[in-house]
Image: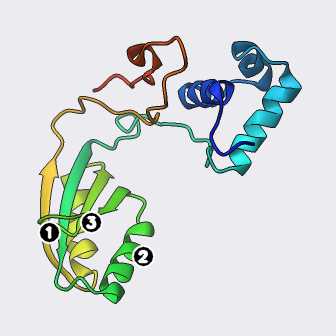
Amino acid sequence: MPTMPDAIDWRILRLLQDNARLSNVELARAVNLSPSPCLARVRALEAAGYISRYVTVLDPLKLGLQLSVFIRVRLERQIEPSLEAFEKAMLDRPEVMECYLMTGDADYLLRVVVPDMQALQDFIVNFLSRVPSVGNIQSSFSLKQVKYQTALPLPAEAGRSRRAATPRTRKAR
């Protein structure tokens, strides 16, 4: 596969981002290829790391996960062992959906999803505050999800407007 995907590869990536359950036959038809070359392209995109995994996006409200909380964490010291220990601790917690090392006032920004205030309190008091070198914790609650999407913006195909090439967005709740 070339270093950068071509127009057909971009269409394949866009379609798979929108619906990873497309069969190879459906995908091939959508990109005007026969199934065998289409599957070879998908496998090449996987091997090159453009496709890292396939997932199913679940509805957190249907699962009883009512609270989405953004937590800013400042460490006492920003030294490598503290950063590594904090990151390892976050990787082991299923309620931590996202964790970013940040610039600015906080060292880390977490997005945590929990069923209720008691679960959040348990997470903060019995876990997060006990992680070595955590110095300050600030939480903000999400009142409404205005936009949520998992599809990355991909380059527009020749002849398509940028607006038409934008991946679909899941309706906010």
Q: Is residue 8 left or right of residue 150?
A: right
Give me the residue at 38% from left, 16% from top: 163
Q: Is residue 57 left or right of residue 163?
A: right
Q: Are marks 2 and 3 in contact (CB under 8 Å)?
A: no
> Which label's residue is closer to the chain start, 2 or 3?
2
Give me the residue at 22% from left, 51% from top: 69
The mark found on residue 137 in the picture is: 1
Question: Residue 9, position in %: x, y?
Answer: 66, 30
Q: Is residue 13 left or right of residue 169?
A: right
Label 2 crowd bin: few (<14), some (14–19), many (20+), radius 10 Å: few
Q: Quadrant of residue 1?
A: top right
Give me the residue at 14% from left, 68% from top: 137
Q: Quadrant of residue 63?
A: top left
Give me the residue at 84% from left, 23% from top: 35
Query: Mark 2 highlights which residue?
Result: 88
Distance from Cα at disc 2 to Cα at disc 1: 18 Å
Does residue 49 sit above or below 146 in this rendering?
below
- Secondary-structure class at tag 3: helix
- Secondary-structure class at tag 1: strand
Q: Nearer the viewer, mark 3 or mark 1?
A: 1
- Secondary-structure class at tag 2: helix
Question: Residue 76, position in %: x, y?
Answer: 16, 84
Query: Mark 3 highlights which residue?
Result: 123
